[in-house]
Amino acid sequence: MQALRAGETVVYDRCGLDALAHALVAADMGNPAFTSEWLRTLEEATNTAMKPLTLLVVVPVSDDLPLEDDGVRSTDLTYQKAVDQRIRSLASEFPRVMEVNGTRAERVSRILDRVDPEGRYGR
């Protein structure tokens, strides 16, 4: 984020909101590693990291977009849906949010329909 220059368009696959949502769900599930102090620190860092973003695109969990078992992320559907709900809840506090679904090509097309060539949202 520190390397971001004025006027530069950058697309991230993930943002701090994802990490915060996963941590909050893990805490809700009783994981003792996620203390309230640690969660407050992560929330502050997430809020700082989100400030320069002009658009947050949310891709919800859906049956037509299954999560691949890559050995890193959980494929437990209950956990996935809990994280998805938490992401949606946190995203609702962000000023510019767009939710997209469908195939990768459909999602990209929907985003490009709403973003101008300079990367500004709102077409």
Image: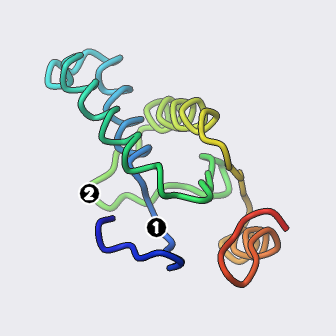
Q: Is residue 78 left or right of residue 96?
A: left
Residue 1 picture quarter: bottom left
- The residue that appears at 69% across and 70% down in the rendered structure is 120
Comparing 4 with 13, the one in front is 4
Mark 2 element type = loop
Amino acid carrying mark 1 in the image:
Tyr
- x%, y% of residue 116? 76, 77
Q: Residue furthest front?
A: 6
Question: Where does label 2 land, which residue?
Answer: 71
Q: Is residue 33 above or below residue 112?
A: above
Q: Is residue 20 above or below residue 67?
A: above
- The residue that appears at 26% across and 57% down in the rendered structure is 71
Q: Is residue 46 left or right of residue 95?
A: left
Amino acid carrying mark 2 in the image:
Gly
The crowding category of the residue bearing disc 2, from other C-alpha atoms within 10 Å (few below 14, some 14 to 19, many at least 20), is few
Comparing 4 with 99, the one in front is 4
The crowding category of the residue bearing disc 1, from other C-alpha atoms within 10 Å (few below 14, some 14 to 19, many at least 20), is few
- x%, y% of residue 28? 35, 17
The number of numbered badges drawn on the structure is: 2
Q: Is residue 123 above or below residue 14?
A: below
Mark 1 element type = loop
Q: Verify CB contact (< 8 Å) between mark 1 and mark 2.
A: no
- The residue that appears at 51% across and 30% down in the rendered structure is 86
**Which label was assigned to residue 12?**
1
